[in-house]
């Protein structure tokens, strides 16, 4: 029995903003200027508002820029230290930056006394500046902490949905597949053996996936396995046209995206058509984004309940929002004869 912490147990990762991003820097500067205005108004002296605001803005904006630069440098390391530790580290770093800048400002007063006037003692100025900055920093870090907790909750919920989706092989599919395999054991044992292997591979892919994203190559292979199994049952009624040669196979995509869409296309479309039909899967790269569409024919006189369709598409939409935010879209286009799902998401091969 080993004593102490368990090996491999990691604390939850912190979710700090990307302090290197231009958008984050702009927000920080705007908030810093608002703080400067509030502090100037609090110490308002008639006739000197603009002068005091200029001095306050210069100090606060420099503090914001230096603090943002420091957090930009330490963010990757800080997030690895754990959830709470990352915020404590950031707080301490910002407090140190504040003290250094306050000391530098006071020393510069002796050099540029006519331009910068600090009507306070050395210790009083440092203490007052540190107290005000600490309060503002604490409020900011508290906001980031709450925001991080919210994002972590969303991620855990999404991961649970991924697990649910991975386990969602419909019972009717399993029953039909097993019946198909049973009928093949006498008429075509070799094909029955291949079907069992395909079913095992599909179950392993659906129930054994541990990562949130996988390569397009692996995702399409899982969908192809599913197609082969359904082909045994539906025969010539099922036709799938793959037009994905332009897609970079090393690009990443949230796990179990294509196969559930293909399952829906067959269950809600092909199965209901007496003569079957063709599912069209297309993909291409457009700039820095990938676009994948899946279209299937639908029966005009009969349709199943749409809850299954909506559940799969909603699940994929939520996982895309978590992985890519506003940079990804999931669109459904439906007519009397066709049902299409269009995916658009950034091309990312960094983890491939």
Image: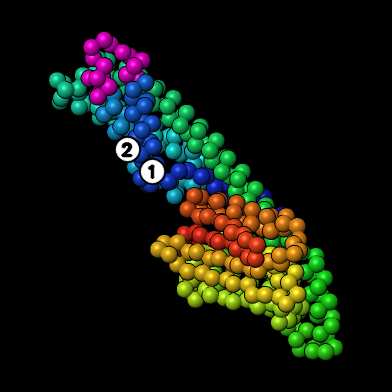
Q: Quadrant of residue 269?
A: bottom right
- Which portion, as a residue range, is magenta? 39-55
For residue 308, what is the image quadrant?
bottom right
Q: Which residue occupies 76% across, 61% down?
A: 304
Query: In the figure, is residue 241 to the left or right of 15?
Result: right
Q: Which mark is residue 302?
A: none
Does any portion of residue 99 appear in the rendered image? no
Q: Secondary structure at mark 2?
A: helix
Of mark 1 and mark 2, the one earlier in the sequence is: 1
Is 113 in front, or is 34?
A: 34
* Residue at (32% x, 37% y) in the render: 65
Q: Residues within 10 Å of mark 1 (few under 14, many from 20)?
A: few
Which label number is shown at residue 23?
A: 1
Task: Check residue 66 in the rendering and tell me which mark sits there, or answer none.
Answer: 2
Please state which of the two labelled residues, at mark 1 or mark 2, is closer to the viewer: 1
Q: In the rendered structure, are the residues bearing label 1 and label 2 in contact, judged by CB atoms less than 8 Å apart?
A: no
Distance between the Cα atoms at labels 1 and 2?
16 Å
Residue 312 in picture, x, y percent from top left: 67, 58
Image x and y of residue 82, in percent: 54, 45
Residue 125 colored in magenta in the image: no
Q: Is residue 322 visible?
A: yes
- Please state the horizontal and vertical placement of residue 173, each as a whole percent of the image: 77, 69
Residue at image position (45%, 39%) is 89
The reply, left or right, for residue 127 in relation to residue 233 is left
Reply above or below: 70 against 351. above
Above or below: residue 300 compared with residue 8: below
> Compared with residue 129, is residue 253 higher up or lower down, i.e. above or below?
below
């Amino acid at each position: 029995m080993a004593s102490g912490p368990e090996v491999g147990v990691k604390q939850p990762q912190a979710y700090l903003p990307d302090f290197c991003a231009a958008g984050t820097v702009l927000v920080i500067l705007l908030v810093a200027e608002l703080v400067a205005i509030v502090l100037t108004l609090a110490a308002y002296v008639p006739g000197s508002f603009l002068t005091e605001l200029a001095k306050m803005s210069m100090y606060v904006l420099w503090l914001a820029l230096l603090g943002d630069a420091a957090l930009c440098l330490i963010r990757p390391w800080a997030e690895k230290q754990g959830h709470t530790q990352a915020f404590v580290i950031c707080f301490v770093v910002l407090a140190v930056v504040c003290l250094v800048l306050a000391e530098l400002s006071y020393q510069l007063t002796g050099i540029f006394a006519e331009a910068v006037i600090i009507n306070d003692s050395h210790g009083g100025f440092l203490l007052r500046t540190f107290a005000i900055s600490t309060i503002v920093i604490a409020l900011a870090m508290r906001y980031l902490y709450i925001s991080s907790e919210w994002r972590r909750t969303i991620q855990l919920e999404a991961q649970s949905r991924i697990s649910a989706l991975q386990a969602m092989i419909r019972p009717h599919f399993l029953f039909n597949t097993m019946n198909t395999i049973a009928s093949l054991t006498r008429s075509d044992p070799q094909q029955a053996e291949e079907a069992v292997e395909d079913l095992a591979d599909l179950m392993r892919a659906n129930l054994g996936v541990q990562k949130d994203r996988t390569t397009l190559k692996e995702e399409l292979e899982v969908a192809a396995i599913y197609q082969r199994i359904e082909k045994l049952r539906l025969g010539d009624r099922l036709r799938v046209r793959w037009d994905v040669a332009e897609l970079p196979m090393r690009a990443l995509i949230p796990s179990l995206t294509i196969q559930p869409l293909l399952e829906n296309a067959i269950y809600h479309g092909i199965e209901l058509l007496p003569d079957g039909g063709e599912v069209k899967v297309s993909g291409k790269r457009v700039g820095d984004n990938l676009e994948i569409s899946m279209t299937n024919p639908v029966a005009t006189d009969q349709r199943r309940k749409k809850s299954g369709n909506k559940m799969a598409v909603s699940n994929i939409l939520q996982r895309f929002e978590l992985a890519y935010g506003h940079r990804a879209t999931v669109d459904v286009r439906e007519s009397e004869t066709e049902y299409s799902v269009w995916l658009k998401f950034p091309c990312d091969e960094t983890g491939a």
